[in-house]
Image (cartoon, rainbow, N blue to C red):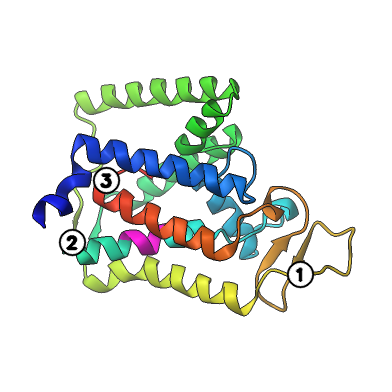
Amino acid sequence: MSGIKNFFATRWGIILAGAIIGVLAAILQKLGNPGNMGICVACFNRDISGGLGLHRAAVVQYVRPETIGLVLGATIAAIVAGEFRSRGGSSPVIRFILGAFAMIGALVFLGCPWRTILRLSGGDLNAIAGLAGLVVGIWIATLFFKNGFSLGKSSGMTPLSGWIFPVVMLGILIAVFIYPAPSEVADETANSVQIGQGLWYSIKGPGSMHAPLFISLIAGLLIGWLAQRSRFCT
């Protein structure tokens, strides 16, 4: 049992996890997700922000179930493996700013590292520039680490803090069922529509393109589980 549990931490386990994620990404795109966006963490976060009404870019407003599934799947995997721990890093403001700039860079390029590979596999040669930028950026970061740069080690936190994010994701999932995507739209000229006082849904553009809800959620759960067990970077 221990061998099975630790398989995805091995080289072949990581390769298998990556292969499964790649296949799932292709399936999600085939079933409705935008081109080369079967899985894209940055783009999905952008769409979720729009779906929650945090921005008004009407063509990218949709709560992506894949991200919710990813968080919940990773949480379940950690609990089952006995690895669920609440930990936090030092220098939270610096980490937040660095994360914000990483997201800005990904959205300018129109894709996170996952989508970079998907775009390249789909024949989009612009992905080479993005991939080169990632490689150079990582190389520069290693120089900082070699010269002693550190934001400090992570430390243990109260168990409650570790549940905040999964519970928030679960709450958003419940909202998706309370405020489902509209089957018909009265104003055909609109780019998006709000359901009641709840979620926003794009009528046109990338936000209007998505795989079926339950398939997206199940795929996200599986990817989250695989990512946690293999330590696959998301």
Going from N to C along the chain, the mark reached first, 3 or 1, is: 1
Could you give the CA–CA distance between mark 3 and mark 1, rounded to whole angstroms? 39 Å
Residue 196: image location, x then y, percent: 72, 78
Q: Which mark is residue 92?
A: none
State the image quarter where residue 156 is shown: bottom left
Q: Which residues are magenta?
A: 70-74
- Residue 59 to residue 151: above or below: below
- Residue 135 to residue 12: above or below: above
Going from N to C along the chain, the mark reached first, 1 or 2, is: 2
Identify the residue position indicated by label 3 in the image.
231
Q: Secondary structure at mark 1?
A: loop
Q: Secondary structure at mark 2?
A: loop
Amino acid type, mark 2: Ala
Could you give the CA–CA distance between mark 1 and mark 2, rounded to whole angstroms? 41 Å
Q: Residue at x 35, y 26 (%)?
A: 138
Residue 107: image location, x then y, percent: 58, 39
Camera-side residue of 146 and 131: 131
Q: Residue at x 26, y 45 (%)?
A: 231
State the image quarter where residue 14 is shown: top left
Q: Residue at x 51, y 71 (%)?
A: 173
Could you classify mark 3 by the number of other residues whose Cα lies within 10 Å: few (under 14), some (14-19), or many (20 or more)? some
Amino acid type, mark 3: Arg
Going from N to C along the chain, the mark reached first, 3 or 2, is: 2
Could you give the CA–CA distance between mark 3 and mark 2, rounded to whole angstroms? 13 Å
Q: Which mark is residue 81?
A: 2
Identify the residue position indicated by label 1 in the image.
183
Q: State which mark lies toward you, 3 or 1.
A: 1
Residue 182: image location, x then y, percent: 74, 70
Residue 179: image location, x then y, percent: 65, 76
Q: Main secondary structure of the magenta part?
A: helix
Q: Is residue 86 visible?
A: no
Q: Is residue 77 visible?
A: yes
